[in-house]
Image (cartoon, rainbow, N blue to C red):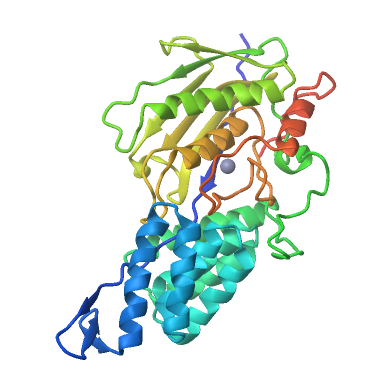
Amino acid sequence: MNPLVAKSITVSFLLISLLAFAEQAKSQTGERYEMDGKPVSRAFYEAGLLVTDANNLLRANRNQEASVKLKQAIAVAPDYAEAHYNYGLSMAKLGNSSLAVEQFHTAIKLNPNLDQCWISLGGVYQSAGQIEDAIQSYKQFLTRFPRSAQASQVSNLVKGLQNELGSGSAKPDAQGFGASAPAKAAADDYLADVTKRGTLRWPSDHHVIRVYMRPPVNVTGYLPRYDAIARQSFTDWANASGGALKFQFQSIPTNADIEFSWISDASKLVNKAEAGETRLTCGKFGIVHGTVRILTVPLMSGIAVTPNRIRLISLHEIGHVLGLTGHTSNPNDAMFYSATIGDEWRNLSPRDINTMTRLYAPATASVNNGP
Ligand SMILES: [Zn+2]
């Protein structure tokens, strides 16, 4: 029996960080007001109350309501940096990246010690595909706050982004934010972008793929509905393949082609800035085995794991295990190199569907070019 030419590819998902300030505001007797133990003007105090309210709304993903309160806070106290920072967060979550960046810059100008602001600025750039600006913001954070508890996570993020930049899969997007328009599709599919390491496919005589979903044991953050989300994601990609691929879910690991599991221990992943990991084993005729592991806990505080995010990460990692091994720089693609700020349910885009259809169209040969 000939030994198979096997190799592993580890390709994962980067997380953005989105943190809100919990501002403590309390009234003192008489005309004195304090925030965080320091005396402040009545205007700052009132703005602080609004920011605290807005913070709870942001956490509940009620971003529109939060933005109304934050706009009021800015009107009451225009020099209050936290109000601008949180207004920027609400804008980012509502998809207005350019206004978010503007507000973050205002906040930093008012108070350069707002450490989270540098991370969130990086997150908005990353989420919009502006990878070099993202790296610059994270580096500013690391230079200014080297002893922050988040320094090691942020430096992992920088490493991950530099890898994307080096691989050429995430070119900086020349058009910038524009009118918060997503990066324009250069083509109707992105097959060329995600197959730079070679075109990998499950072999044409192996298109019924057996999936074993490992039952979670002691996995923090896991919700039973995540299984249904993952299965739906497999099915959506199968439909995108134009009927070429079918998935069979089995309850035992024996002879499974893909092993899918949920994990809550981020230290088990190769890259510490990633929310999931896919490994592929390949032979002469294409992919022979894959493992997908998805993290059920947030890597950084402030970006909660929600069913919507599990959906996007599932689509992304399953895309990898089916042969889309690279990344794109278009935030609308399931294979975009980063998590995005928006916390909403995502379906495969026309570009995702076209790419998978093309990958499994009969004319596409599986060529393993090596890494
Ligand atoms: Zn990936």
Q: Residue at x 56, y 57 (%)?
A: 94
Q: Image check: 85 left or right of 102? A: left
Q: Splitting the image into four quadrants, where does ligand 1 fall? A: top right
Q: Residue at x 46, y 51 (%)?
A: 273
Q: Quadrant of the N terminus?
A: top right
In the displayed structure, 195 sits above or below 93; it is above
Residue that lies at the very extreme toward the left in this rendered image = 29
Residue that lies at the very extreme toward the front in this rendered image = 30
In the displayed structure, 258 sits above or below 191; it is above
Image coordinates of residue 195 in percent, x first then y, are: 72, 37
Q: Residue at x 62, y 61 (%)?
A: 131
Residue 333 seen from this side: yes
Q: Image check: 299 left or right of 24? A: right
In the displayed structure, 20 sits above or below 312; it is below
Q: Quadrant of the rendered structure where residue 220 is?
A: top left
Q: Quadrant of the rendered structure where residue 196 is?
A: top right
Image coordinates of residue 364 in percent, x first then y, are: 81, 25
Q: Quadrant of the C terminus?
A: top right
Nearer to us in this view, 45 or 244: 45
Q: Residue at x 45, y 37 (%)?
A: 307
Q: Image check: 347 left or right of 260? A: right
